Amino acid sequence: MPISALLARIRRLVPNTNARHYDEIVRNFGVGALRPPPTPMSDGELARAIAEFLKDAPTTESVAALGRRLDPTSPL
């Protein structure tokens, strides 16, 4: 799945009140810290990963945790 399509799915899951979280996701895909899942994620799997990420302020640790949820082979 292209990153643009994945980001569109994520954008629908991140409320506008959490724009900083979404911006952090976009930035981390841009710098290569986040990678798209090697196999497609269901809407439920993606929603759970994003919900977990939204619980706290975006930090290096929370981005790394999201990265591991998106791609378990991620070195983060």
Image (spheres, rainbow, N blue to C red):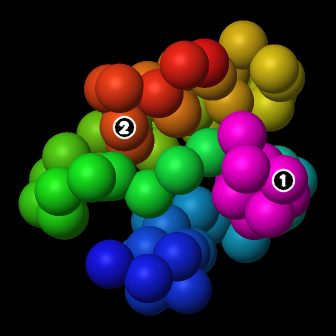
| Mark identifier at residue 71 | 2
Mark 1 nearby-residue class (10 Å; few <14, some 14–19, many ≥20): few
Residue 58: x %, y % from top left: 80, 31
Disc 1 marks a residue whose amino acid type is Val
Tell whether 66 sits left or right of 61: left
Q: Looking at the picture, does residue 69 appear above or below residue 6?
A: above
Disc 2 marks a residue whose amino acid type is Asp
Q: Quadrant of residue 9?
A: bottom left
Q: Which residue is mark 1?
A: 31
Quarter in which the N terminus is drawn: bottom left
Q: Residue at x 52, y 76 (%)?
A: 3
Q: Secondary structure at mark 2?
A: loop
Tell whether 17 sits left or right of 34: right
Distance (Cα) linking label 2 and label 1: 16 Å
**Count of labels in the image:** 2
Q: Looking at the picture, does residue 46 appear above or below residue 56?
A: below
Quarter in which the C terminus is drawn: top right
User: Which residues fall within the magenta stretch?
Assistant: 25-33
Is residue 24 or residue 34 the one in the foreground? 34
Q: Residue at x 62, y 45 (%)?
A: 34
Q: Is residue 17 at all visible to an observer of this figure?
A: no
Q: Looking at the picture, does residue 24 appear above or below residue 53?
A: below
Q: Quadrant of residue 73?
A: top left
Mark 2 nearby-residue class (10 Å; few <14, some 14–19, many ≥20): some
Residue 75: x %, y % from top left: 54, 19
Q: Quadrant of residue 49?
A: top left
- Magenta segment's dominant SS is helix
Q: Secondary structure at mark 1?
A: loop
Residue placed furthest toward the top: 61
